[in-house]
Every structure is written in C-alpha cells, then in structure tokens.
Image (spheres, rainbow, N blue to C red):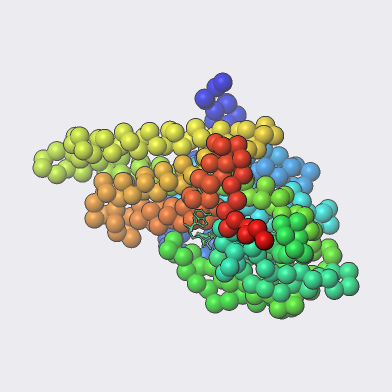
Amino acid sequence: MDFALTEEQRIFQESVRGLANRHLADGALARAHSPRFPLDVAKLFAQNGLIGITIPEADGGNGGTLMDAVIAIEQIALVCPRSADVVQAGNFGPLRTFAEYATPSQKEQYLAKFLAGEAIIALGMSETEAGSAVTDLSTSAKRDGDGYRVNGSKIFTSNSPDADLFLVYVRFGDGIDGIGSVLMDRDMDGFVLGKPAKYMNGEEWCSLHFDDVYIAPENVLLGPGGFKKQIAGFNTERIGNAARSLALGEFSFELARQHALIRKQFGRALCEFQGIQWKFSDMRIQIDAGRLLLYRAAVNADRGLPSAMETSIAKAFCNQAGFELCNESMQVMGGMGYSAESLIEYCFRKTRGWQIAGGSNEMMLNRIAEGVFERRFSQRPPRVKS
Ligand SMILES: Cc1cc2nc3c(=O)[nH]c(=O)nc-3n(C[C@H](O)[C@H](O)[C@H](O)COP(=O)(O)OP(=O)(O)OC[C@H]3O[C@@H](n4cnc5c(N)ncnc54)[C@H](O)[C@@H]3O)c2cc1C
C-alpha cells in the first residue's frame, strides 16, 4: 500500500497546475458567473491533453487513467473552479460512455470534434416523472423501418444550451431491459430545446422535447438491454462529480486559510482564535478523508475493479464534505465570503447541486446500505398479493 502519487503523476499534477495558473487564474470569477459552458477553455484543454485523458490513443485520446483525470480536475479546480467542469465534460459522463460503446463509424463521425474541444455532448436522462427512479423513464423509441421514432421529453440536461450532440436514454420496450440510448444531433427534425432555465449555480439548462424524431440505426448507441452499461458509465461520472465537490471545498478552504492568517479582529489574526482553528482542523480531516475515499474508488476502477459501493461511498462523502467545506470557509470569510465578489459564494452554490445531481446523497446511502447488508432493497412499494 502506498499513499503517495507516483513520480509521473506528480509531474502531471504540476504541469496541470502550471497551465491553470498561466491561463485560468485571471477570469476565474467571470467564468463562475457565466451561465454558459466555457468553450474557449475546452479548446485550451484539448490543445494541452486534458480532454480525452482516459480515451485510448487508438481513438485519438491520451490513453491515461481515471486517476489522471481526477488529478486534472483537482488542479484546475484549485485555480478556476468553473473550468473543472470542462475536465469533467471532456473525460467523464456522456463522453466516456460514448467512447466506450460507440461503433467505429459513430466515433469517426463525432469523437474527433469532442477531443478537439470543438463540440460537447450532453446527457438526456432525467424526466419530470423519472428522477431518482430513472428506470421509470417514458421517452419511447418505436420501430419505424430500420430505425426508430422517438417521442417524449427530458429535463435538467446540463450544458444543453451549448451541446452539439445528446446521449438520450430511451425506452425501446418494457422494463429495465427495454432501456437503451440514442444519439441526437441538436438540429434533428422534431427535436426542440425549451427556453433556458437556471440552476442555483447560475448555469442554464433546457428541457429537451422529441416529437417523432427519426433515429437511423447508425444513431442507436445502446439498444434494448443497454441500461446496465449506461449506468456502469455513470459510476465514472460519479467519481468526477465527487472530485469536483471536494476540490471546490478545498479551493474555498485555501481562500479562508489565507484570510484567517491576515484578517485581524480584536487585535489578533483570526487564526489565533481557537474557535477558528478547530474549524480548519475539522476541514483538514474532511479533505484528507474525502481524498482517500476518492482515490481508492478511482485507482480501483483503473485496475479493472470499478466498484459501485466504493464510488457511492466516495460520492456521498465528498459531496457532503465539499459543501460543508464551502459553508465553513464562507463563515470564516464573514461578509466577504457571502459576497458575489468572492468565489466561495459560487463554490457554495455549486457544491450544493452535487448533493442532488448524478444520484442524490440519499440514493448513494441506499446503495451503501445494500453493500452493508449484502442484499437488494427495492425502493418500490411491495406488490399486493392477490
Ligand atoms: C446541478 C444538476 C445537474 C444535473 N445534470 C443532469 C444532466 O446533465 N442530465 C440529466 O439527465 N439529469 C441531470 N440532473 C438531474 C438529476 O439527475 C436529478 O435531479 C436527480 O436524479 C434527482 O431527481 P429529482 O430531481 O427528480 O428528485 P427526486 O427523485 O424527486 O428526489 C427528491 C428527493 O427525494 C429523495 N429520494 C428519492 N427517492 C428516494 C429513496 N428511494 N430513498 C430516499 N430518498 C429518496 C432524493 O434523494 C431527493 O432528496 C441534474 C441535476 C442537478 C441538480
């Protein structure tokens, strides 16, 4: 067992931090307050090997590890919190699912643009009646000749105002085995994006409406029975999500630490008050504990042992810790921390969302309980025996 990064990982860590300091420190506040995806940052990252880190070289990626992608998220977030979303979009979530399951011709059509930072892919999974209970989704894909006709709608699709391609979960037939996914270009006939709405983090999302959208066979990503693969891809999404939460918490911690060293009240620096010191001690424990859980999940996934249990533990802990770190850091910064001129206020709003997104805290705890008791607990009402 070794708790240190390898020499190679350390060099990578330093180079990402250098890039962030040179290009992203200026403008970090403005980026955090922009409702749209920072496409210019995506191009910068593509030029510097931070998009497609884990995608095989044969597909145009960098053939790195999930752990490398986690390191990249951390180092970018510690300088420009909003830009960490670009590492996420370029390495986790729908892009990774796409890269894993797309056919050679689907990859040829889309992947190069994603890896160049010229296009982004978004995930249409949640529906008004299917949130945590995602398998209740009703967007249907019905046979039409060789292809399918898709009808239904989605909500909460992150990055939808800027996305070029949508990975949409659809129902080909009944039950979990009837679920799969299709790829939709934003300009397909019958595909309409609703008016942008805003999350508490300031980002815009659009509802997606499908009115008889024709999906040719070459735009099916995973046919009926694809749900388990899609959700396995979601485990990785959760690692990126946990990494961003913890990193934004650590970013806030560092701002507050600097503040506590120089801000004086009652003739003493804030860091000289025990009530303040203990906040930082507790925060340090949260950062270290979260990082160990996060790295365990990422390293084991890289070793071919992706574990839903370890990922759920990491996500549940890091999402909670990230938010509490921002909250406590804001407290230390006083009125300044509560002001929109401080990035802590942004990190506070942003980390709050990850307790809901990508499998809420409660859903993670449900999954962990199944691991604890080594049995499945259906969340559905018991069937009434007739
Ligand atoms: C910032 C953000 C980004 C998102 N991005 C995307 C995206 O890109 N694509 C996409 O498809 N969706 C996205 N979502 C949607 C997200 O996946 C859902 O919000 C999430 O799955 C929860 O669903 P819901 O909002 O319908 O809440 P509900 O499922 O209605 O849950 C409401 C509350 O009840 C709790 N609850 C529900 N069931 C149980 C249970 N069995 N046990 C205990 N508690 C339970 C939940 O934890 C939650 O606290 C995003 C959401 C947010 C906040």
**Residue 18 seen in the figure:** no
Relative vertical location of residue 330 with respect to residue 119 in this rendering, above or below: above
In this picture, residue 57 sits left or right of residue 284: right
Say which of 127 and 383 sits in front.
Answer: 383
Indicate the quadrant containing the N terminus: top left, top right, bottom left or bottom right: top right
The image quadrant of residue 258 is top left
In this picture, residue 173 sits left or right of residue 201: right
**Residue 384 seen in the figure:** yes
User: Residue 4 appears at what percent x and percent y?
Assistant: 52, 25
As drawn, which residue projects farthest toward the left? Answer: 266
In this picture, residue 263 sits left or right of residue 42: left
Residue at the (67%, 61%) spot, across then down = 386
The image quadrant of residue 7 is top right
Residue at the (53%, 73%) spot, across then down = 196
As drawn, which residue projects farthest toward the right? Answer: 145
Say which of 22 and 49 sits in front.
Answer: 49
Residue at the (69%, 63%) spot, across then down = 168
As drawn, which residue projects farthest toward the front? Answer: 386
User: Residue 329 appears at what percent x and percent y?
Assistant: 31, 46
User: Residue 300 appears at what percent x and percent y?
Assistant: 62, 33
User: Residue 220 appears at what percent x and percent y?
Assistant: 79, 62
Total labels drawn: 0
